[in-house]
Image: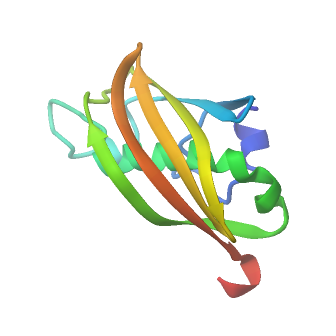
Amino acid sequence: MQREEIKTFLPHREPMLLVDDVEMIGDQAIAHYHVKGDEFFLQGHFPGYPVVPGVIICEIMAQSCCILIREELEKGCTPFYSGIDGARFKRQLRPGDTLTIEGRITNRRGQTFFVEAKSSVDGQLCCKGNLIFTLVPKTQE
């Protein structure tokens, strides 16, 4: 699934849409985001040595993993972060890198989903963590 199809599920739009493509393989989402170098979050982080902020890496992972709950999103819900547990950063993400994200649902309680996610660049672990999303009906936003 490419960006235009991803937009049918996610409410994010440029410049905050941070998923280039995603594919479902079994119960796992595999997604990619290529860091071009002109993104807003690289401006000033850091001059002369641009590095994607860790919180943005978590956002990239979250958007990628929301495709796991696309059937719920089609029902008119918006996914909101409820938590990030055990996030660990192992490698810098820089312009020219392509981040590969893998995620799978580990649990569900009502409208809350628990997702195990990790991201890597060229097979090297970049970030991992457990993400929690709660769906909110659009009428309550």
Question: Could you say which is closer to the camera, residue 68 or residue 108?
Answer: 108
Question: Could you say which is closer to the camera, residue 76 or residue 44?
Answer: 76
Residue drawn where x is 17% and y is 30% of the image: 49
The mark total stands at 0
> Which coloring applies here?
rainbow
In this orientation, does residue 9 appear?
A: no
Percent coordinates x, y for residue 40 in the rendering: 38, 47
3 left or right of 102? Answer: right
Question: Could you say which is closer to the camera, residue 140 or residue 90?
Answer: 90
Percent coordinates x, y for residue 19 in the rendering: 58, 39
- In the picture, the quarter occupied by the N terminus is top right
User: Image quadrant of residue 119?
Assistant: top left
81 left or right of 57? Answer: right
- In the picture, the quarter occupied by the C terminus is bottom right
Residue drawn where x is 75% and y is 84% of the image: 139
Residue drawn where x is 79% and y is 41% of the image: 5
In this orientation, does residue 38 appear?
A: yes
Percent coordinates x, y for residue 69 in the rendering: 72, 52
The relative height of residue 88 versus residue 81 in the rendered view (above or below) is above
Percent coordinates x, y for residue 52 in the rendering: 31, 39
59 left or right of 54? Answer: right
Q: Residue furthest bottom?
A: 140
